[in-house]
Image (cartoon, rainbow, N blue to C red):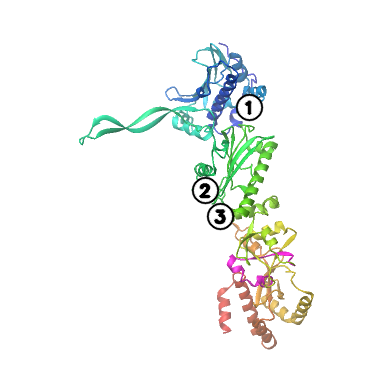
Amino acid sequence: MAKRQFKTESKRILDMMVNSIYTHKEIFLRELISNASDAIDKLSYKVLTESDSKVGKDDFRIDVKVDRGAGTVTVSDNGIGMTAEEMEKNLGYIAHSGTLEFKKEIDDKDNESIGQFGVGFYSAFMVADSVRVVSRAYGAETANVWESEGVDGYTIKEGRKDGFGTDVILHIKDDKGSEEYSEFLETERLRELVEKYSDYIRWPIHMTVDESEWKETGEKDEKGEPKKDYVTTKVDKVVNSMVPIWKKSKKEADDEKCREFYKDKFRDYEDPVSVIRVSAEGNVTYKALLFVPAKAPYDFYTRDFQPGLQLYSNGVLIMDKCADLLPYCFRFVRGVVDSPDFSLNISREVLQHDSQLKAVGSNLTKKVKKELERLMKEEPEKYARFYESFGRQLKYGVVDQYGRDADLLKDLITFHSVKQGKQVSLAQYVEDMPEGQTKIYYVTSETAAHAKDLPQAEPVLAKGYDVLAFTDEIDTFVTNVLREFDKKEFCNVTTEDLGLESEEERKEAEKKDEEYKDLVAFAKETLGEEVADVRISRKLRNHAVLLTTQGNITFEVEKYFREMPGQAGDGIKAARVLELNTDSGAFRSLESAFRTDKERAGKIVRVMYGQACLMAGQSIENPVEYSDLVLSML
């Protein structure tokens, strides 16, 4: 029989279908099962219109069989089947889709046929050196056989087959070096692939699998007890669950069942703090079941963590971890998205340029934010658990990409309130501001408990205003991006003008600056390059000294760059400023020594600077020298 040529007559196109569109060899089974499901869909629709049809919905099935001796894998269905003409049309034209034409014919939005592009069948050539298709169309008396070894062409001839439907028989390639194909002749391996990719196909997928159990032999032992042997038998078994939980109503699958699904699916021992259900119709019809975890995985803040939602097309897994559907800031969200409008050969490039997928991602992003806002207001304890693990991720999201997602996240981040002793949102802080307060005050500190005792916070707290404790190195970067919240500017109580002075207090401070300018100049000369400036403080009340910074580089920024790997942060240092409280006993001792004993005055300046460093959490360059200095003055 003369061999026919593919209508494309192009090895390049077939190579592209096999090697470029699909990146994993194992995907072939998903594609063939999807085609089998489509064939059953077509017949199921057809018999609905036939009053005398003897085919019932419960009769439909897909079978996956392995013959190790023959080296073949067979995927069979009892669907619509194909005539010789349909074989020529569907299998002779690369990228011709009979399913797509079928969908156009019935124009039925509820129809869930999967294949739409006519390329999935050719993925079989990734693992097979020859493919044989035996098909008998529904209502036909004879069958037809399509055979091909790849780009060289194909043959179609009459054949025999009991009953309607299609058998696709793959002769699996021999192993070659690192290319292993024999794994696909293992029944358990194929079962794994069915459960991974096709678990939610709506027709039963049958396989003959091994099942072992203890059975009585009919004999008795010395004690007269029945003897038992561990017997392994071949059993025909449905290996897919068929109905995905996300397609069930809340009545059929309540939140408790969804939480169990989450823990089993995503290998988490804790319940998620929230379950988000989405059912959308429009330009893109899809269902989604999303989860907000309570705890971060051990590798969440490492490069090894792989975020992403699972994408399905009518229950067929098409992408295990799609990281581009939700923004990076929500990468902690787990879950599934299923749509009949998704392509089976979807790729990251398609995701980035497909307007429908972008619309899905935009809608899911809004749903996630809305649910987090609800948790914050209605279930603050749950939100606190979530925030303990993922609050830093939200803050990173504010800063990332030059603040691209800042507006999305600013309502979700919280900081420790020094006044209230708990985490508060920026909206809560602003709502609780006394009349006359115009700024959002914050102080950086190693811990929230330590922040209340810092001299920087004294004047703000004395005024009755609250101060937010910034304990993460990312916090100051967040304020640099946001600049303000609800038209209230952020104010670093350490480095910025607090805006608390009255006109009378301002004039009094200016008089002190003039009065002590010689003493201040002496202190600055004594400390040399260790400080950028020495000033009479306008902030201190109970403490003698305060170490602040000037310019854009704060202590937090310095620490951030100092801890970067390698020498990336070398040379990045905050400009230190020593502030002196003229009402303190230490200043009076300095003032007295400055008039009578300049050497002692210099020592007092260095002690005051050392104390300011310790209070600010900064290390002293030479601790031994400093200790000797303090002891020498006792």
Depth check: 317 or 535 in front? 317
Q: Disc 1 marks which residue?
A: 116
Mark 1–mark 2 Cα distance, whole angstroms, equals 38 Å
Helix, strand or loop at disc 3?
helix
Instruction: Please tell me whether residue 193 belongs to the stretch shown in magenta.
Output: no
Residue depicted at 65% across the width and 26% down the height: 108
> Dot 3, how many residues are within 10 Å of its Cα: few (below 14), some (14-19), or many (20+)?
some
On the image, the x and y values in percent for residue 8 come to: 65, 21
Q: Disc 3 marks which residue?
A: 385
Helix, strand or loop at disc 2?
loop
On the image, the x and y values in percent for residue 151 come to: 59, 21
Tell me the amino acid under the disc marked 2. Answer: Asp
Residue 504: image quadrant is: bottom right
Q: Is residue 610 above or below residue 110?
A: below
Tell me the amino acid under the disc marked 1. Answer: Gln
Per the rendered image, the range of residues in magenta is 436-461
Residue 25: image quadrant is: top right
Q: Is residue 26 above or below residue 493?
A: above
Mark 1–mark 3 Cα distance, whole angstroms, equals 44 Å
Q: Disc 2 marks which residue?
A: 271
- State if disc 3 and disc 1 touch (CB < 8 Å): no
On the image, the x and y values in percent for residue 453 come to: 61, 71
Q: Nearer the viewer, mark 1 or mark 3?
A: 3
Q: Earlier in the sequence, mark 1 or mark 2?
A: 1
Q: Nearer the viewer, mark 1 or mark 2?
A: 2
